[in-house]
Image: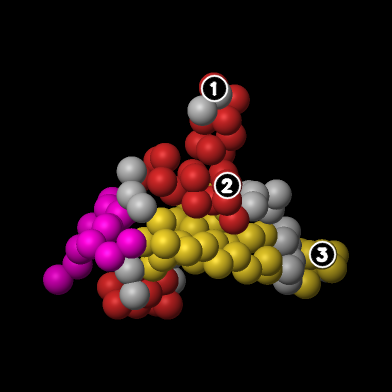
Amino acid sequence: MSTTGKERLTTILLAPHVSEKSARLAGAGNQYVFRVRTDATRPEIRAAVQYLFEVKVDSVRVVNLPGKAKRFGRTPGQRQAWKKAYVRLAAGQTIELGGAERA
């Protein structure tokens, strides 16, 4: 893989998406949820997860979320649209996202 290809892969995943649903999926279905660049494709997301976490990816599902209409003081506005990726890993594979376990 070329240097520019590796640089592109390191910018695809923006952050893990932390929610009750994503925690449930990680525990039960071996799925992880990430915020990704809006111009990222499924093959790029698969390659980025495999490159950054050194795991085998089974499937990638992508959801485009539109910006939500909000008010900023008196001014109406809109939040930025974003993209979310559900990544299912192969059996026996896990990703340690660095979240501290609470008792």
Q: Is residue 15 magenta?
A: no
Q: Is residue 95 magenta?
A: yes
Q: Is residue 17 visible?
A: no
Which part of the image, by quadrant, shows the C terminus? bottom left
Q: Nearer the viewer, residue 89 or 68?
A: 89
Asked if residue 80 is positioned above or below residue 55 in the image, the reply reads: below
Give how far apart the Cα atoms at labels 1 and 2 are. 15 Å
According to the image, label 2 marks what residue?
44
* Position of residue 50 measured from the top left corner of the image (x, y, whole percent): 41, 46
- Please give the range of residues in magenta: 90-103
Residue at coordinates 54% horizontally, 57% vertically from top-left? 35
Q: Is residue 29 visible?
A: yes
According to the image, label 1 marks what residue?
3
According to the image, label 3 marks what residue?
77
* Foreground disc of the pair 3, 2: 2
Give how far apart the Cα atoms at labels 3 and 2 are. 31 Å
Amino acid at pointer 3 = Gly
Circle 2: element type: helix
| Dot 3 crowding, Cα within 10 Å, few <14, some 14–19, many 20+ | few
Residue at coordinates 57% horizontally, 51% vertically from top-left? 43
Secondary structure mostly taken by the magenta-highlighted segment of the chain: loop
Q: For residue 69, what is the image quadrant?
A: bottom right
N-terminal-most mark, 1 or 2: 1
Q: For residue 42, what is the image quadrant?
A: bottom right
Give how far apart the Cα atoms at labels 1 and 3 are. 39 Å
Amino acid at pointer 2 = Glu
Circle 1: element type: helix
Residue at coordinates 42% horizontally, 62% vertically from top-left? 58
Asked if residue 36 is positioned above or below residue 75 in the image, the reply reads: above
